[in-house]
Amino acid sequence: MHLDEIEFKAKDGRIFTLRSLTPHDAEAAIAFMGRMYGESPFLSRYGDEWSIDIEDERRFLERALLGERRLMVGSFWEGALIAIADFLPISSASKMAHRCSCSIAVERAFHNLGIGTAMMKILIHEARTVGYEQMELEVVSENEAAVALYRKLGFVEYGRLPHGFKNRDRSSYDLLSMFLTFKGGSPTPLP
Ligand SMILES: CC(C)(COP(=O)(O)OP(=O)(O)OC[C@H]1O[C@@H](n2cnc3c(N)ncnc32)[C@H](O)[C@@H]1OP(=O)(O)O)[C@@H](O)C(=O)NCCC(=O)NCCS
């Protein structure tokens, strides 16, 4: 899906832009994800496990842009990509056509400014608009900021997988399964 560029104000008053990513963003997206996998212990890979060919990434972003029921958005500060969020169908089977999953990552230097909230609100709004009835995700139980963000937006926990991520130091994280239903209630207001 294509989303035109919009502006939103962060908690510190700075104005950020947000738009759907295109194949032209492939290099920036690869670098961004490399930084995120390197800096966050709560994502599914280590930084040194992230290697993707630029042409594959271009094709991936093109598919996201052309897909009618998937969206990949980036937030930018002074032209630099500082956050990515997306939703996509859980399955192509019609019995699961009402369900999408989502993910988000914001660069550490921009945490706690409301960027994650703004991006999730846009994801939720667009997912409702294209007919999904619920949004689902998995999150490390110790990831307090993410859990707080999802709960604030109405996500509820429906399960817990012990030992979901096993770290190189042999410690492990449980994964919480959370979902947000769009049925009933009023639409999430845009930022
Ligand atoms: C989770 C993440 C996307 C949040 O992005 P963000 O831009 O900082 O989010 P926001 O500023 O909109 O909101 C964060 C909320 O968490 C709260 N928070 C931050 N740290 C917290 C903590 N330790 N305990 C409880 N709440 C916390 C903030 O107060 C804020 O809530 P508020 O707006 O009600 O005050 C970001 O931390 C991130 O990218 N982390 C690394 C990647 C990741 O974990 N992605 C999610 C994988 S499921």
Image (spheres, rainbow, N blue to C red):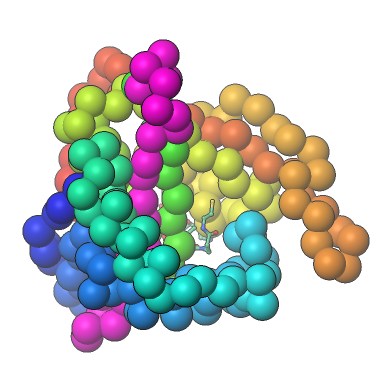
Of 114 and 71, the residue lying toward us: 71
Percent coordinates x, y for residue 33 in the rendering: 48, 71
Q: Quadrant of residue 8 in the image?
A: bottom left
**119 horizontally vs 151: left or right:** left
Vertical placement of 131 versus 87: above or below? above
Of 62 and 48, the residue lying toward us: 62
Res 155 visible: no
Of 4 and 112, the residue lying toward us: 4
Q: Quadrant of residue 61 in the image?
A: bottom left
Percent coordinates x, y for residue 44 in the rendering: 64, 57
Residue 92 is one of the magenta-drawn residues: yes
Vertical placement of 105 versus 1: above or below? below
**Residue at 39%, 67% in the rendered image:** 57
Residue 176 is one of the magenta-drawn residues: no
Q: Which residues are magenta?
A: 73-97
**14 horizontally vs 178: left or right:** left
Q: Quadrant of residue 23 in the image?
A: bottom left
**20 horizontally vs 40: left or right:** left
